[in-house]
Image (cartoon, grey):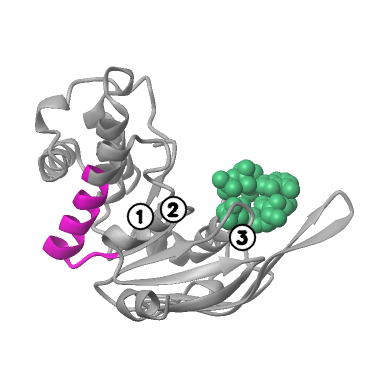
Amino acid sequence: MITTKDLTKVYRSRGRDVLALDSVDLHVQEGEVFGVVGTSGAGKSTLIRCVNLLERPTSGTVTVDGVELTALSGSEQRAGRELREARRRIGMVFQHFNLLSSRTVQQNVELPLEIIGLDRHDRRRKAAELLDLVGLADKAGSYPGQLSGGQKQRVGIARALAGDPKVLLSDEATSALDPETTRSILQLLRDLNQQLGLTVLLITHEMDVIKSVCDSAALMRGGRVVESGRLTDLLADG
Ligand code: ADP
Ligand code: ADP
């Protein structure tokens, strides 16, 4: 469902080159929860941002659901039509939720639907459905500032699902949450994976997250994948 081939990213920073990704080959199967783990600076954020082309890789390819995204034109700011359509099939969840504080929960979830031009009635219906799915039906009229961290992340997840994505990317979605809330959010991701057949690619610096929810994982260090495979095999190898 997600394949990267020879994915390389070099940042130019104050006249120096930083090799953030070094020939990364990743294979995420349809319907699995795949985790990428590594310490700070390993290249995880760069990897996940390259997968939906929020970041343009320096070289290599990214293919999601049969579409080679790196062959499509555009950037984060000005994506071409094909890239915009492909991105719609990729949901993204963020560590700090990225909700609009001046809009209600319902309006936050409706935002991507507004952008694709869904009419008001259909937006409402879809947003209500999604809020129900993440267990927040009773918070539709609340503002983000009135919610707990876990509830905010549920809104973030509902919004990420608005475009009926086949793939969900999670950038440290539980890093700002306490252990109990972390468990409930990971359980939600697992439920969505099973109910909707959603493929999930998540990045984390915590091995516990990988162990509790992932089918497969890759360990990154210094911009490279140093180990990857089914979790059962990785744990058996020590
Ligand atoms: P994390 O390790 O949690 O991903 P960072 O603090 O490394 O967070 O990065 C936060 C933001 O700053 C990211 O958008 C990243 O791309 C950017 N960033 C990280 N390192 C540098 C750097 N050396 N120069 C410029 N921007 C950077
Ligand atoms: P992680 O998410 O695993 O913490 P990142 O992908 O954020 O790792 O960073 C990988 C490397 O790339 C780090 O050395 C970081 O400082 C560097 N980096 C990340 N973003 C930028 C940026 N925008 N400009 C320059 N260097 C960056």
User: Which residue in the structure is indicated by mark 3?
Assistant: 42
Residue 187 higher or lower than 199, as above or below: above
**Distance CA(mark 3)–CA(mark 1):** 17 Å
Could you tell whether 159 is left or right of 87 in the image?
left
Find out if the beta carbon at label 1 lies less than 8 Å from the nearest ligand 2 atom.
no
Amino acid on which disc 3 is placed: Ala
User: Which residue in the structure is indicated by mark 1?
Assistant: 209
Amino acid on which disc 2 is placed: Glu
User: Which residue in the structure is indicated by mark 2?
Assistant: 206
Q: Position of residue 161 (x, y in %)?
A: 25, 51
Closer to the camera, 6 or 115? Answer: 6
Q: Position of residue 7 (x, y in %)?
A: 60, 75
Magenta extent = 184-199
Residue 68 higher or lower than 120, as above or below: below
Tell me the quadrant of the picture where the N terminus can be found: bottom left
**Distance CA(mark 3)–CA(mark 2):** 13 Å
Find out if the beta carbon at label 3 lies less than 8 Å from the nearest ligand 2 atom.
yes
Examine the rendering and report whether any part of residue 63 can be seen. yes
- Residue at the location (21% across, 58% down)? 190
Q: Secondary structure at mark 2?
A: loop
Q: Position of residue 107 (x, y in %)?
A: 26, 30
Tell me the quadrant of the picture where the C terminus can be found: bottom left
User: For residue 188: magenta?
Assistant: yes
Quarter holding residue 117: top left
Which numbered disc flags the more N-terminal residue, 3 or 1? 3
Q: Position of residue 235 (x, y in %)?
A: 36, 74
